[in-house]
Amino acid sequence: MPELPEVETVTAQLAPVLTGRRFASVEILDERLTRPLDPRQVAAQLEGERVAAVGRRGKYVVVRFERRFVLLVHLRMTGSFLVAPHGELPADPYRRAVVNLDDWSDVAYRDVRRFGTWLVLEDDELADYLAARLGEEPLTTAFTTKQLAHRLAGRRAPVKAALLDQRAVAGLGNIYADEALWYAGIRPLRSAGSLDADEVAAVRRGIRRALKVGIERQGATLSDYRTPNGGRGAMQDKFKVYGRAGEPCPRCGALIEKTRVAGRGTSYCPGCQR
Ligand SMILES: [Zn+2]
């Protein structure tokens, strides 16, 4: 499932393709993408509009239009974009939408599991919508140890479960939460509220480190994730603990173990995560 580094990679590749371009025509092939709205209504609203900017917030791709509204895309489990010259998109049974741009390029949206969403919001609705769902952006200066400590304080839930809550930290999912806690040397099952100030600081650094490594590698391709240029991420070759149960820890050599936290498969090192 795409997390912050994957969505950041998607956004970085879509931005130069979309910015300044007009959506010449839009075809939405799956009503689940826009429900409860009629996909024809959403397509009609997007047609003819020019893109002002493309950005990311949490795991959302934010496409801003000149006429003061946004298209908010969440890729969920298996959403991805593919850009191709007009008429050159490969056949794909999982294609859910196609945008033809005014420079004769096509942008396809693919989604095998169909959990992804396209939502149109007015500019003045966006801030409230995101604020209700997302905490701080972990790669900005606003994400401080004090702020993270405030989000974790008093919580009896495992620290990993707390980190997966998008209102605590925006953009973390199962992979990067495990990686972040390995960098921090903290066990995923520790209760969030039990961390002292030094440990919270280590978790903050671990989150930033794990995400930066992920962005450098253009994310992780485990099954469906592709970048809009058709490439794959390479983060899967750099995992410290995720998916490595039974293999030696790269820091201390102990064998990595797998458990479940908040219903999610969770990898950690019993030797150096306390
Ligand atoms: Zn270890």
Image (cartoon, rainbow, N blue to C red):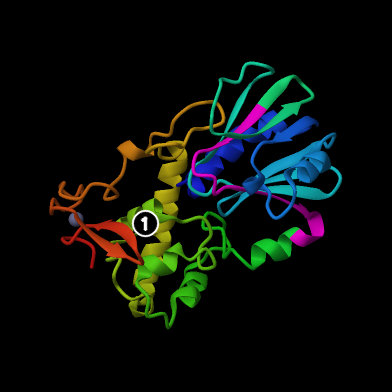
> Do we see residue 4 in this rendering?
yes
Can you give x and y, in whole percent of width and height, for residue 168 in the image?
51, 68
- As for residue 110 lying within the magenta part, the answer is yes
Which residue was labeled with disc 1? 180
Can you give x and y, in whole percent of width and height, for residue 142 in the image?
58, 63
Point 31% across, 40% down: residue? 238
- Residue 18 higher or lower than 123, as above or below: above
Q: Is residue 187 rendered to the left or right of residue 220?
A: left
- Residue 116 higher or lower than 271, as above or below: above
Q: Nearer the viewer, residue 149 or 42?
A: 42
Boundaries of the magenta span: 107-125
- Residue 200 higher or lower than 46, as above or below: below
Q: Residue furthest bottom?
A: 154
Q: Residues within 10 Å of mark 1 (few under 14, many from 20)?
A: many
Picture quadrant of residue 184: bottom left
Can you give x and y, in whole percent of width and height, for residue 83 in the image?
62, 26
Q: Nearer the viewer, residue 135 or 119?
A: 119
- Residue 194 higher or lower than 48, as above or below: below
Element marked by disc 1: helix
> Do we see residue 21 in this rendering?
no
Q: Is residue 117 rendered to the left or right of residue 19?
A: left
Q: Is residue 96 rendered to the left or right of residue 217?
A: right
Point 37% across, 76% down: residue? 157
Q: Is residue 200 rendered to the left or right of residue 84?
A: left
Q: Which amino acid lies under the numbered mark 1 shown in the image of this protein? A: Ala
Q: Residue furthest left?
A: 254
